[in-house]
Image (tube, rainbow, N blue to C red):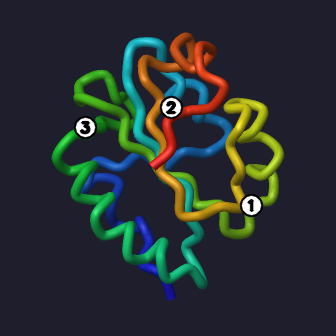
Amino acid sequence: MAENFDNAYEEYNVVKLEISNFEKLALDDEKDSLVMIHSSKFCGPCAHLTVYYKHLGKRFGEIETGDTKNGQIVVGEIDIEGKPEWHTKLPEFLPGIDTNQIPMIFFLPGGCEACSNFSAPLLY
């Protein structure tokens, strides 16, 4: 079973992204964002990457009850396990994203205004 982010939100400054908060947090015009898409179950590569991703959050992210303005960057994660709505909604937010390719980390420079200049975010 893959390692998950259950205890990472406060300890590692990783923001749990949901469809309801994605635009506000990940597409913030004033912040760069680093987002990981993963599955919390049955994904060995996701589990391996999660360990390192948490430490990125600890080093670069900062959250205070959903307010990411004090951190250097928004470090967020999307767990698509059992959430089929992400497969249709995320490509609406970010054309070019294929949610079937996990784990995936992408960088969104400068929020949604900067994203409109790219055909797809920078994938890693």
Q: Amino acid at mark 1?
A: Lys
Query: Please, what secondary structure does the residue beneath circle 1 have?
Result: loop
* Tag 2 and tag 1, C-beta contact below 8 Å: no
Q: Residue 56: horizontal and vertical position, in percent?
A: 25, 51
The answer to which of marks 2 and 1 sits earlier in the sequence is 2
Q: Is residue 53 above or below residue 44?
A: above
Residue occupying the point 53% across, 24% down: 27
Viewer-proximal residue among 19 and 96: 96
Q: Residue 42: horizontal and vertical position, in percent?
A: 60, 84
The answer to which of marks 3 and 1 sits earlier in the sequence is 3
Mark number displayed over residue 62:
3
Q: Amino acid at mark 2?
A: Ala
- Give the CA separation, mark 3 to mark 2: 13 Å
Q: Amino acid at mark 3?
A: Glu
Instruction: Place residue 50 in its image quadrant.
Output: bottom left
Q: Is residue 27 above or below residue 61?
A: above
Give the residue at mark 1.
83
- Give the CA separation, mark 3 to mark 1: 26 Å
